[in-house]
Image (cartoon, rainbow, N blue to C red):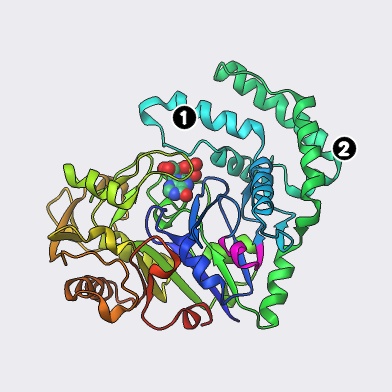
Amino acid sequence: MPATVIVGAQWGDEGKGKIVDLLAQHSDIVCRYQGGPNAGHTIVADGETYKFRHMPSGILWGKECVLGAGCVVDPQVFIEELDDLEARGLSTERVRLSTNAHLIMPWHLALDQAGERRLGKLQIGTTRRGIGPAYGDKAARLGIRVQDLFDPKILRQKIEVALAEKNHWLERVYGAAPIDLEDVSARYEGYAQRLRPYIADTSLLVDRALREGRFVLFEGAQGTLLDLDHGTYPFVTSSSPIAGAAATGVGIGPNRIDAVLGVAKAYLTRVGEGPFPTEIDGPDQERVRELGGEYGTVTGRERRCGWLDLVGLRYAARLNGFTSLALTKLDVLSPFPEIPVCVRYRLPDGSETAEFPAHQGDFHHAAPVYEILPGWGEPLDGMDDVALLPEPARRYVEFVERELDVEVSLIGTGAAREHILSQRGLEAIARP
Ligand code: IMP
């Protein structure tokens, strides 16, 4: 049962796409199990930059790529991605989209935008890609699924039923423009033709592959602290990015998963609103942002930057059951003579805890307790072996391992594929 889940250990943007891309070369299938075009994976390969929103990062190796039932799909974005890949000479023949995945409809985008505007200062800071409204309709059993695209009568009927309610909300509640039935029906019928070759029973496909002993990677989008159940609610996404969701999102048994690789940056970022105990106060925040290129792939927003938070990471290790960790972008910390790492939170009652607070009030008011680690004061560029890392950089990594009791199996030292150092070989990680 050679299945590995790759999951974001923080608030997303940990560099998962690059790790998936690296491990995909030793795998047979790469699956997305949740989320939608709110994700933005950037991969630099052979001097070319690729930005994916729906597509599993394994596509660059020509692997079978699956979007499972737990995903929400914006067909326009997905088709643009397919077209772009083909225009760049990459085959999309092995892409498979679950018939059960839900569609992001134009009213989901309109309602996400209008809802955020209305919340004003209380807004979540979503990517405004329709994610919350699409998952909301799915839970309310009002969603439209990929398979509905292929029955024009059903499709039109579902759009008509949905619009009767959604236009009411758009016009009367938000004062926004209504959506036209004919226009949406025609557009989505058109998408059906383009998407037909990619549709599959992806649960069956992945289960069979696992039974045949093929190697499957499950690629999480967003990150643990954005999880709908366990994240920093309500400042979360509307799906479950944690490792257990790989089983439900694709449709396989949880006992089929062998390994869970967490991906964390050597520091921390967050986009959107919500509490962030280790957010840096002062010019070092801007410095980290510039050095790390911390601007959103999907929205271009500045990411908020902070020091590594081991309380949050310990929580992520618990929720996901990491078998090992990839620590990315260590190079960004190179210029800092001293590097604070948060080891505990001080709570409003004066007590200190190493565990993530279960109550939001405690988390909102938690103050970080830092241990200051020495920096290494030299760039890490071109280092292609863990043994070559400066002593303080190695100690930084070992400190994380000790605190979390999780092995750091991969270390990121730059943007390119070759700037990931492996402690025990990529193949051993991809093929547990
Ligand atoms: P939504 O997923 O667009 O509804 O946004 C909800 C929250 O999740 C916001 O704070 C977003 O900034 C955040 N978010 C969603 N997708 C990502 C991602 O891929 N990386 C980082 N943050 C994300």
Identify the residue position indicated by label 1 in the image.
116
In this view, the residue in front, 170 or 417, is 417
Q: Can residue 151 be seen at all in this image of the molecule?
A: yes
In this view, the residue in front, 425 or 273, is 425
Name the residue located 72 percent from the left edge and 54 percent from the top edge. 100
Name the residue located 70 percent from the left edge and 58 percent from the top edge. 92
In this rendering, the answer to whether 323 lies above or below 20 is below
Q: In terms of secondary structure, where does tag 2 sit? A: helix
Name the residue located 32 percent from the left edge and 52 percent from the top edge. 292
The answer to if 355 sits in the magenta stretch is: no
In this view, the residue in front, 181 or 63, is 63
The kind of residue tagged 2 is Lys
- Is 194 left, or right, of 113 in this rendering? right
Tell me which segment is drawn in magenta: 57-65
Q: Position of residue 155 (x, y in %)?
A: 81, 38
- Is 132 left, or right, of 66 in this rendering? left
- Is 196 left, or right, of 335 in this rendering? right
Q: Position of residue 28 (x, y in %)?
A: 64, 74
Quarter of the image where one finds residue 344: bottom left
Residue extending farthest front: 47
Identify the residue position indicated by label 2 in the image.
153
Crowding near the residue tagged with mark 1, few <14, some 14–19, many ≥20 C-alpha atoms within 10 Å: some
* Disc nearer the start of the sequence (1/2): 1
